[in-house]
Image: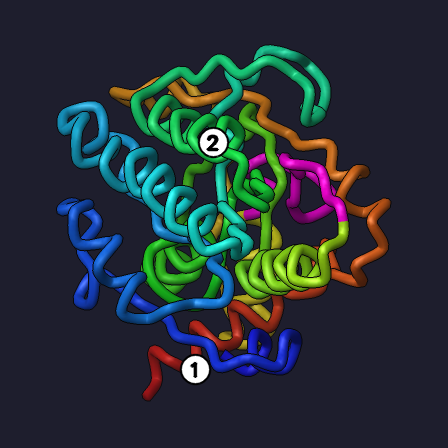
Amino acid sequence: MRILSGKIGLDVVCIGRAECDLNDVSRLMPTLESLKPAGIINAAAFTDVELAERTLWPAMNVNAIAVRTAAEYCLSHDIPLVQISTDYTYDGQKGSPYVEGDPCRPLNVYGYSKLAGDHALLESEVRGTILRTSWVFSPYNRNFVNTMTNLALSRDLVRVVDDQRGNPTDARDLASAAVAVLQELFQGNALPRLLHFGGEPSVSWADLAEATFQAVETYAGSRPKLERISSAEFPSKVLRPMDSRLNTSLFSGLGLGVTQDWEKSIDGCVKEILRSRQS
């Protein structure tokens, strides 16, 4: 909250499922009409990849139809919209980091529904920008770093996939990026309609687990053994991109002053997770 209000000098209202459950998209427009926002950052998403395969329309409601509704509201009120999207719009077969102009070929319902949301914004005349990001972590809620920290405290051995690569992204950096983009749109500055934002450097899931375990060892005095395995040894019911690295040079070239170094923030993230466990 302090990041947002400090950056753009406006009151920030955060609405969650309790205030507006996007499974019922009809609630969104009345909610926005009552709030009368000056701009919108839409970070809402149906992110349970396996559940999305079994429940298409809840995923489409949240990830696509709600985006179209938000874009319609923003266009009719001439306010900017920043949409958070995902690396799962790509199939991971390119073999090098994806740039914004690369074709999208999602492998699963989650990726398809998010891509449909991207198209909803791109096909609108709204003043808006999509931030495609990946592997977001924070001290809160369910995410990879939180899971690995908890496993590090309960297991002697943790097996982690080492042949999937991407860009770990600190949620706080992503929030700062979204606010910086919204500020540019507020000021009427021209921005690309699609930007990649992610932490650097890109790594495998096992590399990110190793960094997490090192931080756990620093603050908790012990760590598990890490066993690096292949995706074939960790079967999943849902296809996922093997190499979804994002080329973030277009965003970096805007000079918005937002950090993208996840290695500098992983230590503090783990420290906060450990602190919350003790409270």
| Closest to the observer, 95 or 255 | 255
Q: What colour scheme governs how the chains and residues are painted in the rendered image of this protein?
A: rainbow
* Rendering coords of residue 258 (x, y %): 74, 61
Q: Is residue 203 magenta?
A: yes
Q: Give, as a three-letter code, the residue at label 1.
A: Arg
SS category of the residue bearing label 2: helix
Q: In the figure, 190 relative to 242: above or below?
A: below
Relative to 103, 240 lies left or right: left
Check disc 1: other Cα within 10 Å, few if <14, some if 14-19, many if 20+.
Answer: few
Q: In the figure, 242 relative to 11: above or below?
A: above
Of the numbered discs in the image, which one, if any, rests on residue 118?
2
* Rendering coords of residue 206 (x, y %): 55, 39
Segment tinted magenta in the rendering: 190-208
| Closest to the observer, 121 or 167 | 121
Check disc 2: other Cα within 10 Å, few if <14, some if 14-19, many if 20+.
Answer: many
Relative to 197, 175 lies left or right: left
Q: Residue at x 46, y 26 (%)?
A: 119
